[in-house]
């Protein structure tokens, strides 16, 4: 029987609560399926680890997880530690060296969930945002001089490479091609950012020629926020730079009803390194320890993990179980306006998995 080795890194805040729930659900799913099992290794990296060791993960941390089949991640972010330290010390310290350059963020309005958009329901909003995840505004290029002095200067340089842009465009066109509508929107800001973003547009044009069956268009990022809000049904697959997609994916999550539901996959498509799956919501310290975090974002991320592992049947079964549970308002957590807690939602998803006879 196939055993998948998964590195579980809950990180900070509600990360622990949702990753525990995710592990439970994945185990139930493997048991129900019977053709594979999971072996989980748990890593206590994150803010608390930092307080003891002055770093977010051990020096050989990546070596410890580089041979796992996938990584299930919770959240990075701690109230006592600056955000750029937690982010660069853990999440980006995994994403970048493991070359997880394609960040995939599906958005749909799940059954039982209400969009804040009047008159928009399920089928009109079905998107996948592809976020460039290795360079651009998050390249880490820049510096600060004369700190604290009046002449202090600082830069954050957005670095784009032809190789980096080409591979994310290919990934996005291919993904668009695999979806029924074969429709891609390339987000840009080449009117104001006149170097790298112009190259981004040129490369989109070039890569598009490899995919004649994909219909595509180009959209400035500011106008894109309006189109997402006013004409959501005109969009399907979307590709954007690291920062643009970061912002647009929060908007997407909100339009689909809650950030608590939104999943993400950090993929190394060539599979030279493990890929990492995580809910988008972050550490949410305000609700930590209360047991009310919405585990659906993690469950949906687990669906993406199963798809990546090639377990399509189990992935579909878990998604179906999640949709059954979201359809029931009594099983909504407070972020969705309900009163259910993490335990109750997790038990309901496991019960739906067990009750599924297909
Ligand atoms: C996300 C998050 C992170 C990001 C934060 C936590 C730094 O917002 O995954 O979208 O900006 O990448
Ligand atoms: Mg974000």
Image (tube, rainbow, N blue to C red):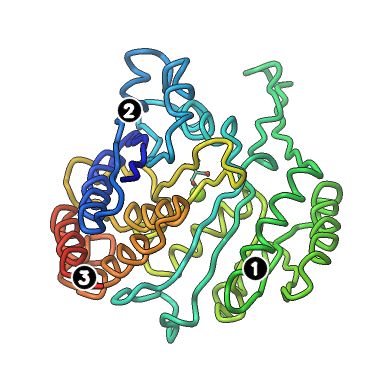
> Of the residues under marks 1 and 3, which one precedes in the sequence?
1
- Residue assigned mark 3: 356
Residue 224 tag number: 1
260 and 26: which is toward the camera: 26
Q: Which class describes the residues within 10 Å of circle 1: few (<14), some (14-19), or many (20+)?
A: some
Judging from the image, what secondary structure is the residue with disc 2 in? loop
> Of the residues under marks 2 and 1, which one precedes in the sequence?
2
- Residue assigned mark 2: 43
Residue 123 pos. (x, y %): 46, 82
Ligand 1 within 8 angstroms of badge 3 C-beta = no
Please report the residue visible at 41 percent of the width from the left and 39 percent of the height from the top. 71
Please report the residue visible at 68 percent of the width from the left and 68 percent of the height from the top. 185
Judging from the image, what secondary structure is the residue with disc 1 in? helix
Please report the residue visible at 28 percent of the width from the left and 65 percent of the height from the top. 322
Distance of label 1 from label 3 (alpha carbons): 40 Å
Residue 230 pos. (x, y %): 57, 79
């Amino acid at each position: 029987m196939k055993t998948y080795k998964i590195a579980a890194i809950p990180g900070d805040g509600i990360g622990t609560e949702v990753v525990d729930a995710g592990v439970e659900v994945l185990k139930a799913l493997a048991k129900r399926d019977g053709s594979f099992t999971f072996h989980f290794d748990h890593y206590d990296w994150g803010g608390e680890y930092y307080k003891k060791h002055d770093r977010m993960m051990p020096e050989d941390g990546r070596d410890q997880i580089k041979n796992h089949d996938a990584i299930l991640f919770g959240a990075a972010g701690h109230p006592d530690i600056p955000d750029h330290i937690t982010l660069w010390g853990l999440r980006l310290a995994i994403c970048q060296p493991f070359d997880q350059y394609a960040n995939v963020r599906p958005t749909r309005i799940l059954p039982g969930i209400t969009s804040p958009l009047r008159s928009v329901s399920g089928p009109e909003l079905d998107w996948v945002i592809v976020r460039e995840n290795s360079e651009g505004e998050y390249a880490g290029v820049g510096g600060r001089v004369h700190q604290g002095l009046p002449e202090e200067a600082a830069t954050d340089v957005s670095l784009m490479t032809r190789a980096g842009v080409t591979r994310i465009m290919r990934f996005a066109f291919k993904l668009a091609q695999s979806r029924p509508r074969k429709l891609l929107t390339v987000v840009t800001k080449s009117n104001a950012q006149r170097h790298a973003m112009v190259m981004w547009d040129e490369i989109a044009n070039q890569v598009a020629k490899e995919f004649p069956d994909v219909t595509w268009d180009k959209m400035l990022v500011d106008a894109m926020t309006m189109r997402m809000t006013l004409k959501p049904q005109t969009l399907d697959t979307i590709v954007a730079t690291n920062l643009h997609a970061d912002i647009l994916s929060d908007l997407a999550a909100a339009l689909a009803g809650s950030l608590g539901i939104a999943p993400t996959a950090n993929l190394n498509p060539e599979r030279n390194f493990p890929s990492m799956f995580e809910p988008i919501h972050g550490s949410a310290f305000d609700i930590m320890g209360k047991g009310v975090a919405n585990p659906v974002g993690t469950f949906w991320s687990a669906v993406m993990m199963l798809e990546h592992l090639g377990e399509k049947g189990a992935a579909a079964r878990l998604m179906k179980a999640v949709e059954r549970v979201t359809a029931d308002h009594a099983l909504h957590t407070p972020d969705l306006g309900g009163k259910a807690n993490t335990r109750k939602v997790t038990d309901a998803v496991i019960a739906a998995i067990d009750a599924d006879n297909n």
